[in-house]
Structure formats: structure tokens, C-alpha cells
Amino acid sequence: MASTRPTRLNNKMWTKKILYIYWLMVIMAFLGQIIGLLVTIYYTPDYIGGFIIHKVIISSSIQVSILLITHYLINHKQIYSSRLLTISGTVLALVTIISHPTVSGLKILLLLAMAVVLIYFDKKKLRFSLVINLIALTSLYALPSIREAGTLYEYFSYHFVLLAGYMAYLIVIERGNEVFQFLQRAAEKEKELIVKSAMMERLSKIDALTGLYNHKTFHEYLDFLYDQSISQGMPLQLALLDIDNFKMINDFYGHSNGDIVLKRVADAISEQVTEDDIVARYGGEEFAILLTNKSLEEACETIESLRLYIANQNHEELNENITVSIGLKTLTEDISKELFFQRADQLLYKAKRSGKNQVMYKQEDSHLAVQET
């Protein structure tokens, strides 16, 4: 398995946490020495002075000094190094072991010192910790007090314990990396699903050719804005726009040029209306515009300006201009949503029958366009 580790590990935070654990270990060691002192007072009162000096004062002073130096390097010099933590932890363990050579099992503290680097999920750091602790364990037996307190069998046993611990820690790192990789893949898949979902949602709402809202999305907005207008008195107009003689454009110039015209008209509508308005391709050459927060006069000016803008656009593919007919209806409280749309459609139909290229905004009135372009 490839060695992969979490790349966003907060080294600063975890380094300080380990430092706090080291302080706790020193305090616990000091309390243990106090208990040992009480036992010494009871059993061997003649050794009290030597115990206090060698096993309490000297060992605790060395450990506190090591921690103060480490604390200074971390908090003031900003050295967040795994090697610093490894060496500090190993030296702290050595001081405890050397101070109490006759206490069986204290050498296992080196295994704890080696475990510190597990937070990094890094095999190289673990190997460094193994080497440091093996050197520390081997050097212990150069001291007569340690050598005399144990057997050769014990000497080799602790080396094998460190190696066994190293193998166990390797498994922990591999398992941690495996879990991390799984979570990373799951997060990536989730991101992909979110992107795909957003794309699918957009595709379901947008007309592919023009980039405007489609028929389905238009009705969703119509439902919402109709309710808002009726309940809160918000002005709402519906304009239905149809390109004049579009079938002839398709038949004479081809559907590809017809698509170019549709796209250009869609762009023109988007440019002329405001951000508060909703524009959709309703179907074929027909477009729908929901105008919000406008009086009828403002809506008429906007739609008339749009009609003139389209009428004055040049279409190189056709070598001529095109025109549009528009039906514009204002929503009133006495009509339903269906009737609102139906009346706008009737106004559009009337604009087409009345000569095209015009905006029809009342059943009995029309606003005729200038025919020259």
C-alpha cells in the first residue's frame, strides 16, 4: 500500500498537546517519587537524604529543564518538529529509568516515547523514533547500575519489545492511512455528486440553445410570483413574445441560421430587461418574460424598447432584420394564474393578427411600432 498521510494535520496544535502530556507525565513521575519517599521513610529511614537528592530533586530538575527547553523551542522559536518531540520524550523516559534502576519494567516507557509520532501517520518519523529509542535502550546497559539490576535475557527482551511495538505501530499507521484514503475518496465522490447534481439541476432548468430558462422553470417562477403578487400586492406583468415569420426563416435560410436568430433574440431580451425579471424560452420561437415591481407604464416602456431593439438588429445570416410581436398583460386580483397566461397569449395573438411587429398590452388598444428598421 502506498504511504499516504493526512496533509492538513495541525502540527502546531498536536505538538502542544503532546507537550502537555509530557508535563503530565513528569508530574505523575514526581508524585510516584513522593510515594517512593514515603515508603523509604518507613522501611529505610537512613536512605532518606540520598533518595530526596538523587531520585527526587536531581531527576525532577533534569526533566523540568528538558521540558522548559522544549517548551521554549516550540512556543517561542516556533519549532514544531516531530524529532524534537521524539528526542525530548526519549530523554524524559531515560531520566526516569536511570533514576530508578531497580524498578522492573520502567524501560517500557521507551515504547510510550516511540508512540508519540503516531499522530503524524508517517513511517519515516516512526523509523526515526525506533532508532532513537533503540540507541537509548542500548546505551542504558552501559551504566553499571542498570546492567547489574537486570539479566542479559531482559536486555534482549526489551529490544524485541521495541521492535514488536514498532511493527504494531506500523500497522496502526497503515490502517490510519487506509481510513484516510477511504474518507478522501468518499469526499471526492461526494463533491463529484454535488457538481453532477448541480449540473443536472441546471440542465433541467435551462434551455440548451438559448441559455434561458425553459418551459418547466418558467411555470415554477410563474407559480411563485403569482402567489407573491396576490398576497403582497407586488406588481407583475407577463409578456409573451413571438418572432414574426420564423417558419419562413427556417424554410428559406435553414434551421441552423434559425437557431442563430433564436440565440440572438434571447440575448437581446436578456440585455434589455432588468435583473428582477424572469426570461424563458417558452417553446419554438416564443419567449416569455415575467416583469416584477413595475407599473404598467414602466413595463410597456421596457417591452417597447425591447421590440425596437430587436427590430433594429442586423442579421448577416438573413441579410435582413426581423421583428417580434408581443402580448403584455398586467396581473389583477380577479384573475387566476391560468387566465393571466391565457390573456397574455390572446394579446400576443391579437398583435400577430393586427399586422405583427407591435406590443399589444390591452384587449382594445395596441402600441404600433415604426416599420422602418
Image (cartoon, rainbow, N blue to C red):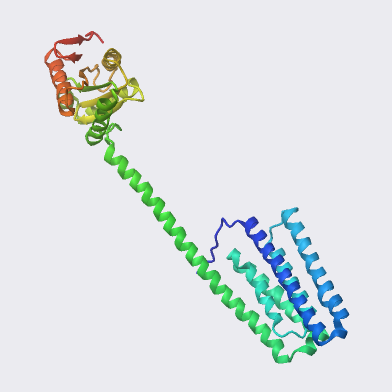
Is 145 left, or right, of 359 in this rendering? right
Q: How many marks?
A: 0
Viewer-closest of 121 and 369: 121
Q: Which quarter of the figure has residue 318?
A: top left
Q: Residue 301, position in %: x, y?
A: 29, 13
Residue furthest to the left: 353
Q: Is residue 150 placed above or below 365 in the rendered structure?
A: below
Q: Is residue 228 placed above or below 166 in the rendered structure?
A: above
Q: Which quarter of the figure has residue 229?
A: top left
Residue 121 is at least partly visible in this image: yes
Is 352 left, or right, of 32 in this rendering? left
Please give the name of the residue rendered at 14% of the width and 14% of the height, measured from the top-left corner.
363
Q: Residue 186, position in %: x, y?
A: 42, 58
Viewer-closest of 114 and 283: 114
Q: Which quarter of the figure has residue 135?
A: bottom right
Q: Is residue 7 placed above or below 262 in the rendered structure?
A: below
Please give the name of the residue rendered at 88% of the width and 79% of the height, measured from the top-left corner.
49
Residue 263 is at least partly visible in this image: no
Please give the name of the residue rendered at 13% of the width and 16% of the height, measured from the top-left corner.
350
Pick the quarter of the image with the C terminus. Answer: top left
Q: Residue 85, position in %: x, y?
A: 70, 65
Q: Residue 191, position in %: x, y?
A: 41, 51
Please give the name of the residue rendered at 82% of the width and 68% of the height, measured from the top-left corner.
61
